[in-house]
Amino acid sequence: MNQNLLFDKYFFDHLKDYSKIGNVTHKILIFFLGKRSIAGLIIFFESCIGIVLNLKVPFYSAMIKIIAENLEGLPRFYGCYFRSLYFSRLIKTLKSNVIIEKGVCFQHPSSVVLSEFAFIDRNVHLMSENTFVGRRVHLAPFVFVTGGGSFEIHDYACMATGSRAITSSESLKKNTRSSGPMVPFSQRDIVKGSVIIKKDAFISVGVTLLTNTIVEAGVVIPANIVSPLKSEQWSVYSNVDSTGRLVRSKKVKRRTPLNLDDF
C-alpha cells in the first residue's frame, strides 16, 4: 500500500504559481488534503485503484498500458494522475507530486526511484538497470538514458531536451565485436558503469554523457557536445574556444554557488 498521497497539498500550493487555479478552489484543496483522515482515505483509494490498474489479465493489462502511455498530459491533469496511479504499483519508489508525461518508458520500473516533485517529461526513455531521480528534477522531452548500468540525477538538476546518458558501452577489447546485441554474447565485452549528475547541475540540449561520467554540483554543460568525464563544481563549460572554433569541452568560468532554501 502507498504511504503517501500521489499529489498532496504542497503540489497544489506549487501549482498556483503556474496556472490559473482559483483562490477559493486552491484553499479548499489545501484544507481537505491537509486533513489526516481525508488524506488517509485518498491514499487507500489510490492504492486500490493502482492494484486494479495492474491486474495481470490478458488484453486488459495491455489496454491499460496503452492508455497510460498515451493519455494527454499537462496542462490537463487527469493523464498525469492516471499515470501516477498506474506506475505506483510498478515503480520501486514513487514519492508525492511526481509528474509523468505521456510516452514515458521505464525499461526496469522495479529499480526506479522518483523523488518528490520530479518531472519526467514527454517521451523520456529511462533504460538503465538502476535509476534514481532526485527532488525537483526535470528530465525534459526526449531525454534518453541507455540501459546496462546505473543512472543518478540529484536534487534540482536538469537534463534539457534531447540530451543523453550512456550507462553502458561496448569496449574495444582484443578479439571482440562491438556492433551490439545481435552479436553472440560470447563475442562481446560490455562495460557497465554509471552516469551521475549532482545537485543543481544543468545539462543543455543535445548533450551526450558517456559511461562513468560524473557531473559535479552546479556544473553547466553547453549544448550539443560530448561531456567531459570529469568536471569541477560550479563551473560553466563551453563548446567553443576564444577564437570561436568548436572544441570538445572547455571550462570558461565559475558560477557562484547558490544560496537558496531547499523546499
Image: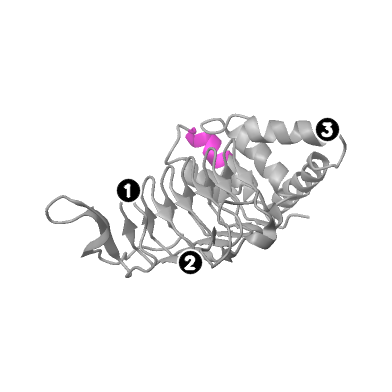
Magenta region's main secondary structure? helix
Give the Cα separation between the discs numbered 3 and 1.
Answer: 43 Å
Instruction: Identify the residue position indicated by label 3 in the image.
Output: 60
Residue at 81%, 36% in the rendered image: 61
Query: In which quadrant will I find the N terminus?
Result: bottom right
Q: Which mark is residue 212?
A: 2
**On the image, numbered disc 1 is attached to which residue?**
223
Q: Quadrant of residue 54?
A: top right
Identify the element where label 2 is drawn.
Answer: loop
Where residue 145 appears, x then y in whole percent?
A: 53, 51
Give the x, y percent position of residue 132.
57, 60
- State the residue lying farthest toward the left: 243
- In space, the residues marked 2 and 3 are separated at their CA atoms by 40 Å
Q: Are marks 3 and 1 in contact (CB under 8 Å)?
A: no
Mark whose residue sits in front, 2 or 1: 2
The image's colouring method is one colour
Q: Where 216 sits versus 227, above or below?
A: below
Q: Are marks 2 and 3 in contact (CB under 8 Å)?
A: no
- The amino acid marked with disc number 1 is Ala
Q: Residue at x 36, y 49 (%)?
A: 204
Q: Which residues are magenta?
A: 21-28
**Along the polypeptide, which appears first: circle 2 or circle 3?**
3
Instruction: For marks 2 and 3, give the one nearer the viewer.
Output: 2
The picture places residue 77, in percent across and down from the top left corner, at 58, 34
